[in-house]
Image (spheres, rainbow, N blue to C red):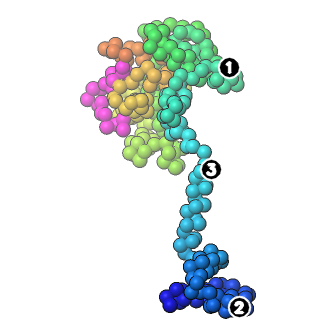
Amino acid sequence: MRVWIVFLLCLAGHAMAAPAEEVTAVEDLAMVEEEVVVEEEPVVEEIIVEEPEVGANPVQIEVGDFDEAIEVVEDVPAENVCLNHHCKKGKVCEVDESNTPMCVCQDPSTCPVAEGEFEHVCGTDNKTYDTSCHFFATKCTLEGTKKGHKLHLDYIGSCKYIEPCMDSELNEFPLRMRDWLKNVLVTLYERDEDNNLLTEKQKLRVKKIYENEKRLQAGEHSLDLLAHDFEKNYNMYIFPVHWQFGQLDQHPVDGYLTHTELSPLRAPLIPMEHCTTRFFEECDADNDKYIALEEWATCFGIKDQDVDKDLII
């Protein structure tokens, strides 16, 4: 009796899902009634197999979406693990057999060709390299050697004769450098509409300099005027000197400047200021190959009591 009820329910569901076959379903019912006792299970299996799809069943939708998602994932190529793996200049990312990223020296021949002489750089080996890419790739191949340890980017442009820096000229260098740093900060303050160039704390400090009526405006000034302004408006120069140190102290941020960290400032300056190299060499008072904040401040004439690590943040 139970089988008979199940059979009728299934048949009724079949009829509701396909009303166009109503007459045929009734005839099938009459024929099966005579054989139901003998062939209950075969008939039920046949009807279940042939039962058409029921409409929008939530379970079917979830399963269908899941299956589709699997197919999409299978079609997506393996993630490039090098995309978020950063290498220092002169190295490129490659993956090993286990798809683990690693940094290896770049082949200099794979560097882009220089578009002009303006891309040339000069190394401390007095050799001109087509681009900074060629320089750093070459330096990487020399890692672990004495030559590689001594090789650094000297300045931007093709190698040329740099005249020696006399003692009198060396004393003049910080006068121009301090004034230039102050003017750079003022320019950044004027252009920083979206707060992308200076932090809020930095802007407040530069604002005091910017609004000071005694500030020496940017321009060509005599060395005597620069020296006089530094003496009269000394406080205006304290933050610019600290700020520049903080901008260079990045890899890592440890309160010391290496030759590499100085490069962004040195490289463009040397062709214009021939005392640049000697100035920074003498800033390293203890000759340990690092310039500490205190040494940096002393080079620019900042008094010991005004050296403040909080100003470089």
- Secondary structure beneath disc 2? helix
Query: Which residue shows up at 59% across the image and 66% down it?
Result: 64
- Secondary structure beneath disc 3? helix
Tell me the number on the disc at residue 27: 2
Q: Which residue of the protein is positioned furthest toward the front in this rendering?
A: 38
- Check contact, mark 2 vs mark 1: CB within 8 A: no
Mark before the other along the chain sequence, 2 or 1: 2
**Mark 3 → mark 1, Cα distance in angstroms:** 46 Å
Quadrant of image for the C terminus: top left
Q: Is 296 a magenta residue?
A: yes
Query: Which residue shows up at 62% across the image and 74% down it?
Result: 49
Tell me the number on the disc at residue 62: none
Mark before the other along the chain sequence, 3 or 2: 2
Which region shows up in magenta?
Answer: 290-313
Identify whether 101 is placed above or below 64: above
Which marked residue is nearer to the observer: mark 2 or mark 1? 2
Query: Which x, y percent locates residue 173?
Result: 46, 18
| Residue 23 in view (yes/no) | yes
Q: Is 82 a magenta residue?
A: no
Residue to which mark 1 is pinned: 117
Categorize mark 2 by other alpha carbons within 10 Å: few (<14), some (14-19), many (20+). Answer: few
- Secondary structure beneath disc 1? helix
| Residue 275 in view (yes/no) | no
| Left-right relation of 40 to 282 | right
What kind of residue is marked 1? Answer: Glu
Query: Which x, y percent locates residue 254?
Result: 34, 30
Which marked residue is nearer to the observer: mark 3 or mark 2? 2
Residue to which mark 3 is pinned: 75
Q: Nearer the viewer, residue 108 or 219?
A: 108
Identify whether 250 is placed above or below 222: below
**Mark 3 → mark 2, Cα distance in angstroms:** 50 Å
**Mark 2 → mark 1, Cα distance in angstroms:** 94 Å
